[in-house]
Amino acid sequence: MDKTEIIEILNEWNYWRRDISHTISRETYDEKIASLLAHNETLVIKGIRRSGKSTLMLNAIKKLLADGVKAKNILFVNLEDPRFINHLSIYLLQTIKDVYIEYLDPDEKPYLFLDEIQNIPNWEKWINKEYELKLSHTIISGSNSSMLSSEIASTLSGRYLKVNVYPLSFKEYLQFKDIKIENKLDMVDKKIELNRAFEEYLRFGGFPKVVEYAPDQKKELLNTYKDSILLKDIVARYSLKEFKKLEEIAAFLLANSGISQNPNKLKNNFNISYDMAHAYLEYLLKAYMIFEVPKFDYSLKKQNANDKKYYSVDLGLSNIMRVPNLQTRGDDLETIVFHELLRRGYKIYYYKTSNNLECDFLVEDDNRIIQLIQVTSSLKNEKTKKRELSSFSKIIDELKLKNIKTTVICEDNSSNIEYNNIPIEIFNIKEWILNL
């Protein structure tokens, strides 16, 4: 590519001579990114395709400009621009920077925002060079967790900070819908509006762009997301030939969010080899389509051998994969709680007692189990209540836990109860998510 073509592309994407586009702030992410930019490390923003990473980069650029950084000292590069597609290499990265330096003449160490950098083979070597020679502040994004494989993490060891980006939380979803819920009275006052938004969130998920579309268009957009993630982040990356089988396994795991699974089960269910089942599971994890939760055990060897539970990244993707009338409300509430715990920075396990009672989540913070959580639609049915609550005392006894919180998250009203001499907090799921 010649430099005239490159600067024309860069000029289209940057805000050197035009106003910056309107975006909605995602405060938790924006504040974290702004604070991390104060450190002289490579900042890695990673998460599933279409989760809003590019917008977060744009918000960071806005903050830099508001803080007095000159526009000419900031470069944004979209590495998925189709005009770059036949030139993706470290040489392209260096040429882009050289052209930027020539045309913009930055007078301070520039901020380089490189979006979807995993498209560049060996990108980490170029980033490491920028870091070691103190040539730029580098902020990079990627849609595939293999960009932080052990080898790359070793190359950038001690030189990067990361931000994990997920589709919108329900709190962010309300913000995008311009629904303000700041206290419990707001929940009462806007009950109908709040409940309608919650049902939409359960059905269509939290991909930011999906929120803007009419209901009859959301499903079509979600299907394009699904195809794009499978084709770009898995099929193309790993040169797969069995796309249909990959799509079937993805559909199964997404539609059955929270399912306990292992490669042997997938092998038998889909009549494929163990190696293929194991590989496809890893590919879906690396593309952030699913998340893995281990069964807790004090023995790491046993923990690694046990079945894992797999959660969908987004209920919108789950629902386009499901058969009509499938009853999944309890599983969907569990998926929402799982992602909220992830956003809050906890390490998460599930657990099964010796008499096969299951607890949805054991929550670890600072290397200590601090909370047991069950998720259900309602405790009003006595059979359900017994099933959900009986595990608490058994788990506390088996794992010898002390000073542990026991919590049920459901759609009933919040309250405090005692069961088997264990004090239990009952949280309405909307109150719990919104921290009210």
Image (cartoon, helix red, strand yellow):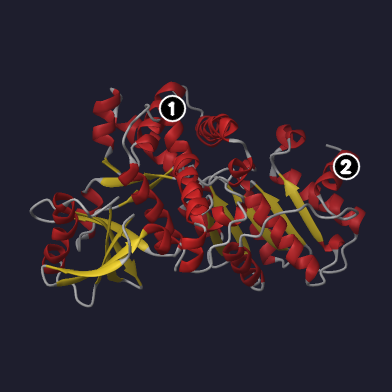
Residue at 41 percent of width and 63 percent of height: 431
Q: Is residue 48 left or right of residue 178?
A: left
Residue sitting at the far bottom: 403
Q: Amino acid at mark 1?
A: Glu
For label 1, the crowd category at 10 Å Cα-Cα, with few meaning under 14, some 14 to 19 and many 20 or more, is: some
Residue 154 horizontal/vertical position (percent):
50, 59
Say the numbered circle drawn on residue 247. 1
For label 2, the crowd category at 10 Å Cα-Cα, with few meaning under 14, some 14 to 19 and many 20 or more, is: few
**Marks 1 and 2, how far apart at CA:** 38 Å
Residue at 85 percent of width and 55 percent of height: 19
| Residue 68 in view, yes or no | yes
Residue hosting label 2: 8
Q: How many marks?
A: 2
Of helix, strand and loop, which one carries label 1? helix
Earlier along the polypeptide chain: callout 1 or callout 2? 2
Residue at 64 percent of width and 59 percent of height: 128
| Residue 124 in view, yes or no | no
Q: Amino acid at mark 2?
A: Glu
Marks 1 and 2 close (CB-CB < 8 Å): no
The answer to which of 195 and 57 lies nearer the viewer is: 195
Of helix, strand and loop, which one carries label 2? helix
Quadrant location, the C terminus: bottom left
Residue 292 horizontal/vertical position (percent):
35, 48
